[in-house]
Image: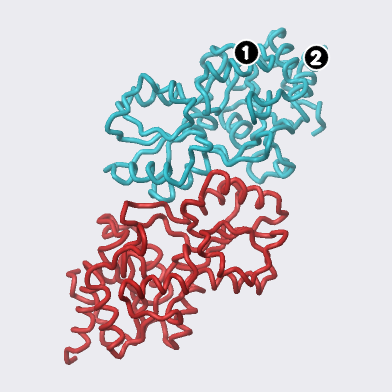
Chain colours: A cyan, B red
């Protein structure tokens, strides 16, 4: 499919969900860098008649801190427009009376301030990055093996992501390590969990077929959205790799060079007379 | 099955293979500690008419260093009696013209001295312990993703093991992390690979049904040996956990409290008249 040959749905769309890291910016030292054209693309979507939400598996920072970083990079984004796994997980833990042992990045800890963490009866892992030490993983493993019913929550299940200094293993790899060691299956909070996508659709008040997801992660963004009934478009930025375009299980509704190209094509097609 | 109620095969056996860590000794600070009765049990087996070999997935030290440690603990063991994954892997790499990027414990590096490590075209991971850092795992991951045909060798696939200060994640957990991140299946060198067990049987010149494997790891020692046609007995030391006795997929031919109890029962039964 050519870059601008949309799947004939552009005019019927009422909302767009954007993944953030690898679509809006590349993370890395400091705030990272905005991907060329993305700041303008977000502006154009906001100026359009489409609803816009952001849906990220970012778990290195509390939502407020994370959004402030994007605002510093020049993005017009509000905290209320951003959906991320940690607040969703905190809600689940409280609802089920669970007390987590947290293996998450320090910056994410504030999201769990209101959750009782004494005498843990489950483990929550996020993208802990440098905190994924041998010692910390052994500790999380021991908490799980000491539980009568080991319960592991993973904030997302990404395989890897790209920072300015190269590809990094994401939380999903460490989730698999603990799943194997403990012989259990983790509960994933975040993309591609249907519950998580549905919470964004609910907030928009839209049906899945009215919404397009744009992401750099073929399986979690595109495939996850498609399984919920949304359209899914992949951008060739961030963690995109050429092999994605021949993936055996997931085929994007379109693959485009960047968010800028995607938004340009989308809005142009919506302006054409039917 | 009662501790000493052997599966009626004791008299037909011609050889015994012993796992080492968790059967002979518990690892930990320094040389670790011999498990009570194990030193004598090895002596008794050596004094019997049974052939004896040791088969370990130990990958923290070169075989010479590892055997020297066991000798210091008081065990009568020779290097030539010990089968471990690293020498087996080095042979495979040379045979197939592969140049490894090694993520292994420093002490294991001498086993690969004779293997070309320039311009790597595969990754080999062992139980790297503290060397399983976020940085080192990302590096191994990047080597794999840069290869046209990513190839990962894992020295064993253990889930965890016990040291004197608690349970630790074993190489299998990190193998699963890299398998997931790279969407590949590792080649396992070591237990429970049938090729590996067969190399021990070849050295003994025995048929599988003539040999008994004794280990603390239900899946890799007992299950692995059974899949090769050997008998498999689990000891309740090392990484043994009570849940092993109701494992859905693997049932030991017998479960005994310790190697000492196993050898005592085995030799006693062999002395009884038929």
The reply to whether dot 1 and dot 2 touch (C-beta < 8 Å) is no
Q: Are marks 1 and 2 on the same chain?
A: yes
| Image position, residue B177 (x, y; %) | 52, 48
- In terms of depth relative to the viewer, which is nearer, B173 or A14? B173
**Chain letter of disc 2 in the image:** A
Position in image of residue A272 (x %, y %): 82, 13
Counting from the top left corner in percent of width and height, residue A248 is at 66, 46
Residue at 79 percent across and 34 percent down: it is A1
Q: Residue at (28%, 88%) from the top-left corner?
A: B47
Badge 1: residue crowd in 10 Å (few <14, some 14–19, many ≥20): some
Q: Which mark is residue A274?
A: 2
Give the secondary structure at mark 2. Answer: loop
Label number found at residue A77: 1
Q: Is residue B40 left or right of residue B228?
A: left
Mark 2, residues whose alpha carbon is within 10 Å: few (<14), some, or many (≥20)? few
Q: In percent of the image, x 70 and y 37: which residue is there?
A: A240
Chain on which label 1 sits = A
Between discs 1 and 2, the one toward the N terminus: 1
């Amino acid at each position: 499919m050519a870059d601008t040959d949309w799947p004939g749905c552009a005019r019927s769309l009422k909302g767009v969900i954007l993944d953030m890291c690898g679509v809006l910016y590349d993370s890395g030292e400091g705030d990272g860098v905005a991907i060329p054209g993305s700041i303008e693309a977000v502006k154009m979507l906001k100026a359009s008649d489409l609803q816009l939400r952001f849906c990220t598996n970012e778990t290195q920072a509390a939502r407020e801190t994370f959004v402030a970083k994007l605002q510093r990079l020049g993005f017009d984004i509000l905290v209320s427009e951003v959906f991320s796994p940690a607040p969703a997980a905190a809600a689940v833990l409280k609802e089920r009376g669970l007390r987590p042992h947290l293996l998450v990045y320090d910056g994410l800890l504030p999201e769990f301030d209101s959750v009782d963490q004494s005498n843990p009866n489950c483990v929550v892992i996020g993208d802990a990055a440098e905190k994924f030490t041998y010692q910390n993983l052994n500790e999380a493993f021991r908490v799980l093996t000491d539980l009568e019913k080991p319960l592991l929550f993973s904030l997302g299940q990404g395989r890897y992501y790209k920072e300015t200094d190269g590809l990094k293993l994401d939380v999903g790899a460490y989730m698999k390590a603990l799943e194997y060691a403990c012989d259990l299956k983790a509960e994933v909070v975040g993309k591609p969990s249907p519950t998580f996508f549905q919470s964004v659709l609910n907030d928009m008040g839209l049906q899945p077929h009215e919404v397009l997801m744009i992401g750099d992660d073929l399986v979690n963004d595109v495939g996850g959205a498609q399984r919920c009934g949304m359209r899914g478009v992949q951008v060739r930025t961030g963690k995109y790799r050429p092999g994605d375009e021949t993936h055996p299980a997931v085929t994007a509704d379109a693959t485009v060079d960047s968010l800028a190209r995607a938004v340009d094509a989308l809005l142009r097609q919506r302006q054409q007379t039917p």
